[in-house]
Amino acid sequence: MILIIDFGSQYNQLIARRVRELNIYCQIEPPTISLAKIKELSPEAIILSGGPASVYQKNAPRCDERIFELGIPILGICYGMQFMVHTLGGHVKRSRKREYGFANLNIGKRDTLFRGIAKTTSCWMSHGDSCTRLPKGFKKIARTPNAPIAALEDAKRSFYGVQFHPEVAHTPCGKDMLRNFLFRIAHTKPRWNMKSFIHESIREIRDTVGNGKVVLGLSGGVDSSVAAVLLNRAIGKRLVCIFVDNGLLRKDEAKKVENLFRKNFKLNLKVIDAAERFLKKLRNVTDPEKKRKIIGGEFIKVFEKEAKKIGGIKFLAQGTLYPDLIESKSAFGGPTAVIKTHHNVGGLPKRMKLKLVEPLKHLFKDEVRKLGKELGMPDEVVWRQPFPGPGLAVRIIGAITKERLDILREVDARLIEEIKKAGFYHKLWQSFTVLLPVKSVGIMGDERTYENVAAIRAVTSQDAMTADWARLPHELLAKVSNRIINEVRGVNRVVYDISSKPPSTIEWE
């Protein structure tokens, strides 16, 4: 495995993704990780990430300097390179000219990190500090117009550093550089794939759980579904899945979940109809964060009550992914702002005094889909678009009523049906409709109408950290709009959302 030490870069996930794409397992850990823990993980190499700090600042993030005595290859990226230089006796200073964006990289030595790469290429820079003096044993191997030391190496100790970001798409040969570091310098082997992940996960689950019972809240989404099937393979009937129908689901959702997981996968599944309870609690609530907290709180109460009925539960399983943790709270306790509360990172473990089992916590969404396919799950589930934990409550702007939920369910069903027919469903990260808190005048059958406005939201993305609005064909949008207005009573106008993330979020609330 490869250890990535997180110094706070916005690109940390990309480093991990690039390493995984080369079929090598990697793990992101904070700089506070102990040397003992690093030795326990036994990484074949370490990558030090970038970050916003300056190494000479008083509270700059630092990891244990004894990593440089472990005798394994180390690659420093941006701040990671500066930390390496600063720690090993070189100098880092504020640059006269900062570099942000594209830069021409002139490579002087091309037999190790830059093997097979043209002497001049482009790279993506984002730094205000520069290395001005190399530590003993290091040599400069590349430069840019504003960074005389854009890359360096100590070939004897297999220490390498780059001032730019090889993990981003804007560095065209960046993946080749990472490949050279991993395969030519660290001599790792591409052994990690979903078959090996399943084997290792089943062993870990059995070691953790022993003879205990595990409870899991099954939503029908990709993450919880894949987690459920993986856990079921590991411990069978000692996994109890609870599906809470909160009345905020899409059309026929509860029936589909029950049929698929009870009949096809033989899961030990309990279905709870709590629609009236949730709607009562949400009456006249319009603030989105209040909606999320009410729904999360009620889910915990319902889930806790049902789990107590089962008895003997010692573990709670969740389909948590790494990006979930980042948007709810900085993964390592940093200053990342809370954008909105996430449904599956709540207070259940503390409240129920259960130990947490999160078999997917080191995976990205695309890897979860690959895992689902390897587990034999149908495309209908594996390639399902994300659906928020609070459901349609955050797609109805304003107050939530059964009438408005029924309207949105019908509107959304028609959008998804046409998106699938046109072959766009798997090309989009998400596509859904939002019911707005405004009405507009229309004409139907020569009569004046005053009815709801529905918005269509369709975005493309790799991991939901950023997203762009989808350029759907006008003919498709026209067909969807026509069907919604003609077939769904209560809607007389359809609009299309053309905002990207950032600055907007994917969901409206």
Image (cartoon, helix red, strand yellow):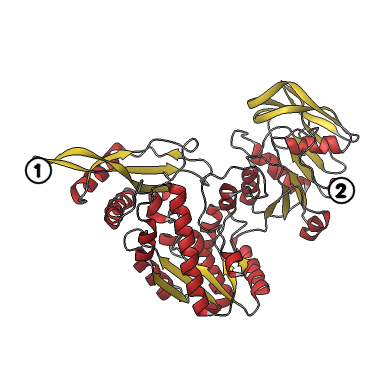
Residue at image position (21%, 45%) is 485
Q: Position of residue 143 (x, y in %)?
A: 75, 26
Distance, label 2 to label 1, CA atoms, is 78 Å
Indicate which disc, 2 or 1, sits on the residue closer to the N terminus: 2
Q: Position of residue 33 (x, y in %)?
A: 77, 52
- 10 Å crowding of disc 2: few (<14), some (14-19), many (20+): few
Left or right: residue 189 versus residue 326 is right
Q: Residue 66 has which mark?
A: 2
Residue at image position (49%, 60%) is 297
Instruction: Point out the residue furthest to the left here.
Output: 446
Query: Does residue 111 appear in the picture of this structure?
Result: no
- 10 Å crowding of disc 1: few (<14), some (14-19), many (20+): few
Secondary structure of residue under mark 2: helix
Q: Residue 445 has which mark?
A: 1
Q: Eyeballing the image, is 267 above or below 146?
A: below
Residue at image position (86%, 44%) is 157
Quadrant of the rendering where the N terminus is positioned:
bottom right
Q: At label 2, which amino acid type do we have?
A: Arg
Q: At label 1, which amino acid type do we have?
A: Gly
Left or right: residue 396 versus residue 209 is left
